[in-house]
Image (tube, grey):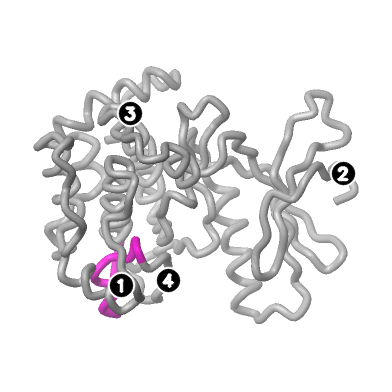
Amino acid sequence: MEEYEKIAVAGRGAHGICWLCRKKKDISRQKVIVKAVSTLGLKNSEEASIMSEVKILSELHHPNIIGYIEYFSSDGALSIVMEYAEGGTLSKFLQDQNGVLLKEEVALNYFTQITMAVDYLHNKFILHRDLKTQNILMNKKKTIVKLSDFGISKQLNTKSVASTVVGTPNYLSPEICEGRQYNQKSDMWSLGCILYELTHLTRAFDGESLPSIVMKITQGRHNEFGSHLSSRMKELIGFLLTINEDKRPGTKLVLTCPLVLPVCMSVNLGMGRITKMNI
């Protein structure tokens, strides 16, 4: 940490702390996040999870994914240096709306950016496995959203399914709740939950206890759609929240559907990506 000047604590976890920092010798004085995780007393599996996050982050280069800068070990801790998103989490942004719904086109723009990032991951055979509004960060102007927290992501390698139960209960897919094997379609379910939250400011599945939430998920009983929602938006959310994962759409189908494709093209143009889209 000697190369970095600590500004403030950005967050705390079970095994470490996130610092908002500046690199001392950087003329631009650009702020970064340094995620310092203590390796003392960690199980082999926990240390492997940290190194997995480092490996995944170092290989990802996408405007809607938090950028990796470097990592280093010192004083019994492994530190991961990442891009700093000044706008905070999407979850906090939605809470700060105080019940004032986003315009549908704004919600769709955020959703499209997130889906484009997930498409990039899936093309690399990587599952995020913990997609939720708390793991989506925003720029200062709240115009760009970026995926973060790859601590439990899984690279599929040559296998097409995984079976470890991970993730936040409210966003878990039916197949994970039932302990079945899952693939990229599980991330698609989580995207459906996020789109519902973007358009309603409440979660698609909630309950007083974990069993009650799981029961709703496995039965596909999400909260009702608001009357403000367009029929095409209802169809898209419903399509993503299809219980049968084989009938659930993938990123390619979502990004090319009539509701999303124009937004996808607009997002690409707005970010200077005017080359052929990878869809």
Which numbered disc, 1 or 3, marks the residue that appears first in the sequence? 3
Disc 1 is placed on an element classified as helix
Label 4, label 1: how far apart the Cα atoms are: 8 Å
**Neighbour class for label 4 at 10 Å: few (<14), some, many (≥20)?**
few
Q: Relative to the observer, which residue lies in front, 175 or 124?
A: 175
Instruction: Give the spatial CA distance, label 3 vs label 2.
Output: 39 Å
Q: Which residue is identified by label 4?
A: 166
Q: Which residue is mark 1?
A: 176
Q: Going 46% across and 47% down the picture, which residue do you hit? A: 91
Residue 181 visible (yes or no): no
* Image quarter of residue 165: bottom left
Q: Residue at x 25, y 31 (%)?
A: 104
Q: Label 1 amino acid?
A: Ile
Task: Please indicate whether residue 98 sits to the left or right of residue 196 in the image.
Answer: right
Q: Estimate the x, y position of residue 112 in percent, counting from the top left.
A: 32, 35
Q: How many marks?
A: 4
Decide which of tag 4 and tag 1 comes sooner along the chain. Answer: 4
The magenta-colored residue range is 170-183
What is the x, y in percent for residue 241? 19, 56
Q: CA distance from mark 2 to mark 1?
A: 42 Å
Residue type (three-letter) at the residue carrying disc 4: Val
Task: Choose the circle earlier in sequence order: 2 or 1.
Answer: 2
Q: Is residue 99 above or below residue 241?
A: above
Disc 3 target residue: 106
Residue linked to disc 2:
3
- Asked if the residue under mark 1 is in contact with the one under mark 4, i.e. CB atoms within 8 Å, the reply is yes
Residue 176 drawn above or below residue 63 = below
Q: Residues within 10 Å of mark 2 (few under 14, many from 20)?
A: few
